[in-house]
Image (spheres, rainbow, N blue to C red):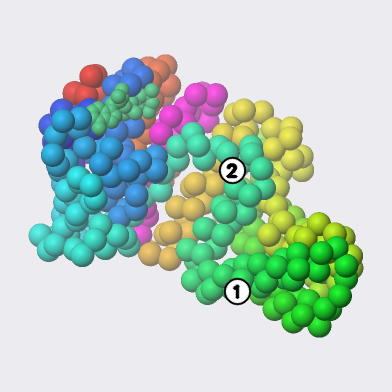
Amino acid sequence: MKVKKLCGENFRNLLPFSLEFCEGTNVIYGNNAQGKTNLIEAIWLFTGAKSFRSAKDSEMVAFGAGNARLKLDFIAGGIERQAALTINNRRYAELDTKKLKSASGLIGNFCATVFSPTDLAVVKEGPALRRRFLDLAIGQLYPNYVTVLKDYTRALTQRNAVLKAMEGKLKDSELLDVFENELVVSGEKIADYRRKYCERLTVNASEIYNELSSLREELEAVYMPSCSEDFAESLYKARRTDVYSGITSVGPHRDDLDFKINGISARTFGSQGQQRSIAISLKLAEAKNLYDILGEEPVVIFDDVMSELDKSRQSFILNHIKGKQVFITCPDPDNITGLADGKVFTVEGGKIK
Ligand SMILES: Nc1ncnc2c1ncn2[C@@H]1O[C@H](COP(=O)(O)OP(=O)(O)OP(=O)(O)O)[C@@H](O)[C@H]1O
Ligand SMILES: [Mg+2]
């Protein structure tokens, strides 16, 4: 997948532009608040997804304008294609001059992965974000996983409802049996998917992390199931405490994922640069997964990744992501002195040169 050309008008603060990109690394450089993230957001929208900033569509139209217009020339599967977006209160898309029913019709035609500073939360914050990360990643690979997850959530809601109805006293145990059986069937499948995915992630992400850290550090994604023994038995044992609290205390909804560097938990002990490097490796591993499914390298977009990385890690990002087109924003000229080959765009007050 390669972006050849992007044109736009009335998109956020950007003045009308028409840009041709190179097939390797494209650096978008400029001071704060000049329009760098706006530019890569414009590219991202052609994946058919919503803005990665979770902005409302109308917020992307330049203040005072009616419609934003974007046009993208790209190459997919060796074929030149063209897509266009019109944005007002919603997004309208065209692909190869045909109008699509909705912008999500672009999904699978143009693909990209984006890293923005908020992705660091997966490494640094609480387990709910890591479960979400796992669920999204596995759901993309195996649609059946999404169904299993729904079954599990339904059974969990029902078991919790029965627990609450017991008002602190263990009774109606046949009803608990029913929902626990359902929980166990879907819960064991979920655990199985997650365990296998973590093994795959360890292989893919650690290879990337290895290169990023110049082979000095070893990354491991370790699945941390909430119950290590038999799930059915754990549920049964937890009945007494669960009736008391009215919620189910064990199961995949309490799982976590630990990222370890050289065997040590990165969430607790990792440095800023290490945590950032893990988040970057996870994104590149996701790109590899997309490649495995689609047979096409997605475009890789990095928003503000360079700070906190040392020169050798910066050089990896700039020069060593093989076979993929890379877009990267940065505000500091020092960050791009190591760029061996590629194109640099400067953004100033919405004007791109
Ligand atoms: N709909 C809009 N119309 C006009 N201007 C907008 C609109 N939305 C955002 N802006 C302006 O765009 C400016 C640049 O935003 P952007 O996020 O691209 O900056 P940036 O170059 O990435 O900066 P930083 O280095 O701080 O991340 C902001 O100052 C914002 O006020
Ligand atoms: Mg920005």
Picture quadrant of residue 30: top left
Q: Nearer the viewer, residue 144 or 345?
A: 144
Residue displayed at 48% across by 59% down: 289
Which circle marks residue 151 in the picture?
1
The residues tagged by marks 2 and 1 sit, at their Cα atoms, a distance apart of: 25 Å
- Where does label 2 land, which residue? 122
Identify the element where label 1 is drawn: helix
The amino acid pointed to by label 1 is Asp
Residue 306 located within the stretch drawn in magenta: yes
Numbered disc 2: secondary structure: helix
Does any portion of residue 268 appear in the rendered image?
A: yes
| Viewer-closest of 187 and 351 | 187
Q: Give the mark nearest the N terminus, 2 or 1.
A: 2
Q: Residue at 64% across / 58% down in the picture?
A: 198
Q: Residue at x 19, y 54 (%)?
A: 92
Residue 281 screen position, x and y as percent:
54, 44
Which residue range is magenta in the image? 296-318
Mark 2: give few (<14), some (14-19) or many (20+) Cα within 10 Å.
many
